[in-house]
Image (cartoon, helix red, strand yellow):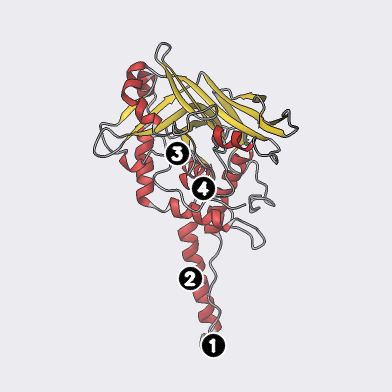
Amino acid sequence: MAHAPIWVACLMVPLCVTACSKKDNHVYIPDEAEALSERIQTQSNPVPVLVTAEQLQPLAPTDEVDDGALESFHQQLTDKQQQADWQTFRQQLKLKPDQIVWLGSQRRRFKEDFNPVDLRHTNAYLQANQLMINYFRRLKSPNLIEAQGELETTADYQQRLDAAQQQHQQLTGKLKVDLSHLELALNVLHAPVCFNVDDQDAYNAIEYDADHETLSLRTSIPYVTEKEVLAQAYNPNFDGQQVEVLKVELHYPLAQAKRNLDDLKRGTCLGYLLQLDAAQRLTVKQLILSAYSSDTAIPQPVVYRFKPQQLRYDLYQEQQEVTRRDDGTRDYHPKPRQLLRSTDIPIPQQIDYRFGLANISAETQGASDE
């Protein structure tokens, strides 16, 4: 399975994390007092460890891993600027050390193996867990040592070999896997889910009800417009098409809407705030909308944490209807849209997967993501 090669600082579309350091960012959290009272200092409450240094074993020569995914993970983990920008974004959201944000990577949107952020896809957690663990297992694997030279004695070669092994042990002996690595892995492997009003239709829209202070968003996944689909129904070869639409509804204060609705309509992405418990399981606590403000010289992030009034996937069937004219020719046109299935996603929601080594046996730790 191919994975995204880059997790850029601008993870969301169009939110650019590099602008998060500005003090005048628009941030709205429904219960500000509670958020402030629950704030935990990283120094006294470190990021939870998922795999200790003692538990982490090197990759075996026979283990198969996804080199592309590991390279992508490495690039983003070692990019100091991106990591600093992401930490600033986390601070803006007032996250605790045991909380992560799952938004996805913008570069994934244009890959053939489109893999959007989706709470229903349980294999997403297994894949992210394997990716982060295999990355550090590879780091702990011994480096290849140059073979004994023609003019090198066996004693000198053994001394060089022992020195290299000792140095490798010193460099990797304390490696461990923590929650921040899981956050990175989840985002690297998935595309963001975004909304815009460029093609406002039955599949895609951002709408606001001022009377009820309700914000409604919907988008087709993968993205397609109603016009594109229905146009095919006039083609005799059209066999029908299923379209899945994600719908989100939330309370959004009128004052906030007056300030940020135009920004949201230029493009906003949906993310999830998850929290780790003592059993190393995640619970989805809230949703996050992220966009940017264009009312300043430098675009400012607009973020909003909330519990949705509705989070639902609707699956529609678009079909063709054929009628005959008086002259015997056929007329092709769309049938009325049929709703096949609705799936409500409850929030909060516990993820039934234990991260770390609990679900990875010694035989399967190095298995590549299928």
- Which mark's residue is nearer the viewer, 4 or 2? 4
Q: Nearer the viewer, mark 1 or mark 4?
A: 4
Q: Which residue is mark 2?
A: 163
Instruction: Name the amino acid type tagged 1.
Output: Glu
**Which label is found at residue 47?**
3
In which quarter of the view is residue 197 placed?
top left
Task: Give coordinates of residue 346: x percent, y percent.
Answer: 58, 22
Residue 302 in picture, x, y percent from top left: 35, 31
Q: Whole-percent x and y of residue 229?
A: 60, 36
Marks 3 and 2, the one that precedes in the sequence: 3
Image mark for residue 110: 4
Residue type, label 2? Ala
Judge depth for marks 3 and 2 and give the one in front. 3
Cα distance between the residues tagged 1 and 4: 52 Å
Q: Nearer the viewer, residue 95 or 270?
A: 270
For image coordinates 65% across by 34% down, the residue present is: 242
Q: Earlier in the sequence, mark 1 or mark 3?
A: 3
Q: In the rendered image of this protein, does residue 140 appear above or below residue 185?
A: below
